[in-house]
Amino acid sequence: MLNLVFIAGILITVCTAIPVFLQMRHHPKGLIACFFIEMWERFSFYGMRGLLIYYLTKHFLFSDSHASAQYASYMTLIYLIPLVGGLVADRWLGTRRAAIFGAVLLVLGHFGMAFEGKPAQQTLIYHGQTYEFVRQGMDAPKLKVGDHLYAYSADAQENLAITGLPDGAALPQVLPAGNYKLERHVVTPWAEDAFFLSVALIILGVGYLKPNVSTIVGQLYPDRDPRRDSGFQLYYFGINLGSFWAAIICGYLGETVGWWAGFGAAGVGMALGLVGFLLGKSWLMGKGEAPDPDALSARVGGVVRKDWLIYLVSLIGVGVIYVLVQKNTIVFYALLLMSIAMLGYIVWHMMTKFTRAESFRTGLALILSFASIVFFTLEELAGSALALFADRNVDLNLLKAPVIWHVFGREIVFASQDQLTTLGALPAGHVWIDMTYTAAQTQTINTGWILILAPIFAALFAFLGKRGKDPDPVKKFAFGIVSTGLGFLVLVWAGPMANAAFQLPLIFLVLNYLMTTIGEMTVSPVGLSQQTKLSPAMTVSTMMALWFVGTAWAQYFGGLITKSMSALTIGGHVVDPAESLRASLSVFNMIGVAVIVFGIALFALSFFIKGWSFGANDSAPEAAGSGQNV
């Protein structure tokens, strides 16, 4: 058996990786070490993220509202905790040690996710009587009344109609909303605790690793080095190469083999990234070391080394995160307070320690961080609102029916797993090309586009930079934000083309991701580069962490958007796909228009603040022998 998505992934990887590695010959060797640990970290992270919303709704049977809040809490903390990781690295550990500690936590967390327990059970309560919903493979469960199983449907008011229920049955054929109650029963008591503990380890691990690897990349280049933006584009390719294969491998395993297999594969990937980073230490040329190694090795109270004390205190923080991640409201207030504190810390430096040029540069970096919230709010819907939309309202069949080719006396069968069962017995020696495309695997579309476009944009920015024609970063942001807004309007415009199952053609989701990816290429790598380029050395890790706080706000706002699209589900399956489609497209239209208006306003603002960089974005000729090249 061969899987078409895997075959396509290999072809895309080979074709796109060759130009990337050719360009990396002209960059410091340390970029390779950072490239590979971030690639595997993103493999583990996106492997878990791609399955998470489905795991919550289909395994634990959380409602859409509960699942979206839980997902938002997790993702918000994922980007909030880098505040801690950046500060600890700046003041004590250094970026390299902090990244290693984070990687260890991630390995433990991802392997912990593989312990899933048995799935929760859904029941219906009516007039004090309990009725069970019976799962039948991956299909929607059926309601058991007496000895028979019945399908059901619901309208926009959530009145539940039971199909084929005979007169005189224990239940009426239509259950009015409010007269019945849906409950879920946890079968494995420790499963949710194991899940939240694993999630807490992952959150803290990302907090230590994510901002600090990005900071090391910036430290590899001298000031005003024209290779910096190109280097971040190549680094960004590594991020998305890991993300691309995460969706293919973990998404496939999680939805066809079992959740444990998808999450376990993510843990294996992170372990490989950790080993590679340890082996590549010499390539970092001493970058990322502790600011005061002697003080770090000193014993606190004559008992324990300061670095080990930091690790122990951090592990206590896992318990705090374990509690926080289950409380969406507390996460909001924690995000608000930490954002205010961090902004106050930066503003205090601007007023007391920075030069005039440093203050304006920092102000520009803060504006970019704020603008990134708008972009990432839409882009990060891929793991929540768009993931549920793909599962419920997108036709994922790559072929409408099985296709059989007769080649050199052998039959080549193109069919999904479900379609294959309809063909009956096939001759010995046939070749099956599996056309299964799972909802989790749709996240390969975004990363696939990035793999294709990243070398092109890297070469384009380098070409324009050498000639002094590179647009300023604010204009790049405005272009990317408008492109992303248009991507969501594409889905709205495709609404009339939905099939009888209220599913849009897959091509429109592909186009949405294309528009979002174009936006991503002009926002995320540019923003990462600008944080290291514009920030003074004493606050560079803090500013990088603050960039991720902007993404934390995007996750929180994304949770609110996803919650506004909530639909009635039973056993993890939406009951009224028509209402689900209507609600989704209504929200997509609103956010698409709003974001386009914001992007246009940002473009106008760029003409007034382009001088705030004080020459930091001016390219200098490439110095001979600068950095250690491959």
Image: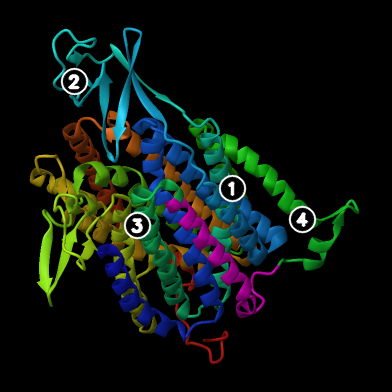
In the image, residue 283 lies in the stretch drawn in magenta: yes
Q: Is 54 left, or right, of 339 in this rendering?
A: left
Dot 1 falls on a residue whose secondary structure is helix
- Residue type of the residue flagged with mark 3: Leu
* Residue 307 x %, y %: 76, 58
Q: Is 203 left, or right, of 144 in this rendering?
A: right
- Residue type of the residue flagged with mark 4: Trp
Disc nearer the start of the sequence (2/3): 2
Distance between the alpha carbons at the discs numbered 1 and 3 = 41 Å
Q: Which residue is mark 1?
A: 201
Disc nearer the start of the sequence (1/3): 1
- Residue placed farthest to the front in the image? 428
Query: Which of the two discs, 2 and 4, sits closer to the camera?
Result: 2
Circle 4 packing at 10 Å, graded few (<14), some (14-19), many (20+), is: some
Dot 3 falls on a residue whose secondary structure is helix
Disc nearer the start of the sequence (3/4): 4
The stretch in magenta equals 261-289
Distance between the alpha carbons at the discs numbered 2 and 3 = 57 Å
Disc nearer the start of the sequence (2/4): 2
Distance between the alpha carbons at the discs numbered 1 and 4 = 17 Å
In the rendered structure, are the residues bearing label 2 and label 4 in contact, judged by CB atoms less than 8 Å apart? Answer: no
Q: Is 610 left, or right, of 273 in this rendering?
A: left
Q: Which circle marks residue 162 in the picture?
A: 2
* Residue 154 x %, y %: 19, 24
Dot 2 falls on a residue whose secondary structure is strand
* Residue 138 x %, y %: 29, 41
Res. 469 visible in picture: no
Q: Nearer the viewer, residue 273 or 324?
A: 273
In the rendered structure, are the residues bearing label 1 and label 4 in contact, judged by CB atoms less than 8 Å apart? Answer: no
